[in-house]
């Protein structure tokens, strides 16, 4: 029987969590290790966080693995990261599949190193019938680039300008079919969006923590979800409770 202490009662559970996994380099520097050791530890941590999301009952997790801006990093770091990610995918995809995780790619496959590209294609295919947790991995992803992609798709389909609505844009993004994130987490103390889910995070709740990504464990995730439960989400309107208060008596 499952350990009931592992099933926390959250006031509100975000259906979709997105994470900017920041701070691998600083984690390594603090230990006088090469940056790659930080990325390796960050990748290990990702496995732990995915498992925690499955346990907590999160439906969608979107992670920023490699941005369109990350190409500006030194060549060695870029190729090292590609290698680490390709190895991790190959090593973990079987277990993720067993856990019922469906892997989905958002971003542009082109330009990625061949082993990583092939690993993504295989992982997406192997896990396509799973539905316990939808894991969207942003590889070669940029929020602005995604909007350019959506516009290109809309033009290719010959949709007339007067027919274009917010729904048209939403349905032509890499994330089509995926609800907007309820909660976006950024680790390591930085407080920027950094071109992540630019369109989709318009009404997301943001959670910033000083904790570096390799140290952002299940307990840290629990804290973020509890904090989310204390937010008053209004989506630009007002809550039913606020309406009642104003018009009461
Ligand atoms: C930011 O830390 C982190 C990244 C650019 C890479 C994130 C990727 C992973 C954790 C691996 C994911 C693996 C798979 C299989 C999806 P940073 O290097 O910017 O850290 P710093 O700001 O401290 O220098």
Image (cartoon, grey):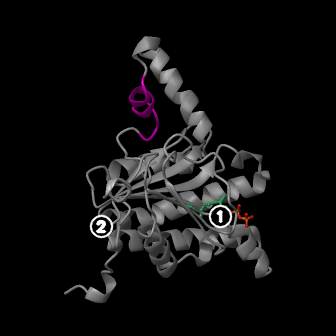
Magenta stretch encompasses residue 107: no
User: In the image, which is nearer the foreground, mark 1 or mark 2?
Assistant: 1
Q: Is mark 2 within 8 Å of ligand 1?
A: no
Q: Residue at x 38, y 62 (%)?
A: 14
Q: Residue at x 44, y 61 (%)?
A: 232
Mark sitting earlier along the chain (1/2): 1
For label 1, being within 8 Å of ligand 1 is answered yes
Residue sitting at x 52%, y 64%: 88
Magenta segment range? 165-175
- For this view, does 165 lie left or right of residue 194? left
| Along the line of sight, the residue nearer the viewer: 237 or 230 | 237
Q: Position of residue 201 (x, y in %)?
A: 51, 47
Residue at the front extreme of this rendering: 249
> Can you give x and y, in whole percent of width and height, for residue 94 in the image?
36, 64
What residue is shown with label 2?
98
Residue 22's mark?
1
Position of the C terminus, as image quadrant, is bottom left
- Classify mark 1: residues with Cα within 10 Å, few (<14), some (14-19) or many (20+): many
Local SS, label 1: loop
User: In the image, residue 197 lies at what x, y percent?
Assistant: 54, 46
């Amino acid at each position: 029987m499952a350990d009931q202490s592992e099933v926390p009662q959250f006031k509100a559970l975000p259906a979709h969590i997105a994470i900017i996994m920041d701070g691998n380099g600083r984690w390594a520097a603090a230990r006088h290790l090469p940056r790659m050791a930080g990325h390796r530890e960050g990748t290990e941590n990702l496995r732990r966080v995915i498992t925690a999301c499955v346990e907590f009952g999160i439906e969608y997790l979107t992670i920023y693995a490699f941005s369109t801006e990350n190409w500006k990093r030194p060549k060695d770091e870029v190729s090292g990261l590609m290698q680490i990610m390709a190895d991790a995918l190959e090593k973990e995809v079987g277990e993720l599949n067993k856990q019922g995780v469906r892997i989905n790619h958002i971003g542009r496959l082109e330009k990625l190193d061949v082993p990583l590209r092939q690993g993504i294609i295989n992982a997406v295919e192997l896990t396509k019938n799973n539905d316990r947790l939808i894991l969207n991995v942003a590889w070669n992803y940029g929020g602005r680039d995604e909007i350019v992609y959506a516009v290109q798709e809309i033009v290719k389909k010959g949709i007339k300008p007067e027919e274009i609505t917010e729904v048209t844009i939403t349905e032509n993004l890499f994330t089509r079919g995926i609800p907007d994130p309820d909660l976006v987490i950024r680790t390591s103390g930085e407080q920027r969006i950094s071109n992540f889910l630019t369109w989709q995070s318009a009404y997301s709740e943001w959670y910033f923590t000083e904790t570096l990504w390799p140290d952002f464990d299940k307990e840290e995730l629990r804290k973020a979800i509890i904090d989310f439960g204390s937010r008053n989400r209004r989506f630009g309107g007002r809550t039913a409770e606020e309406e009642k208060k104003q018009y009461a008596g």
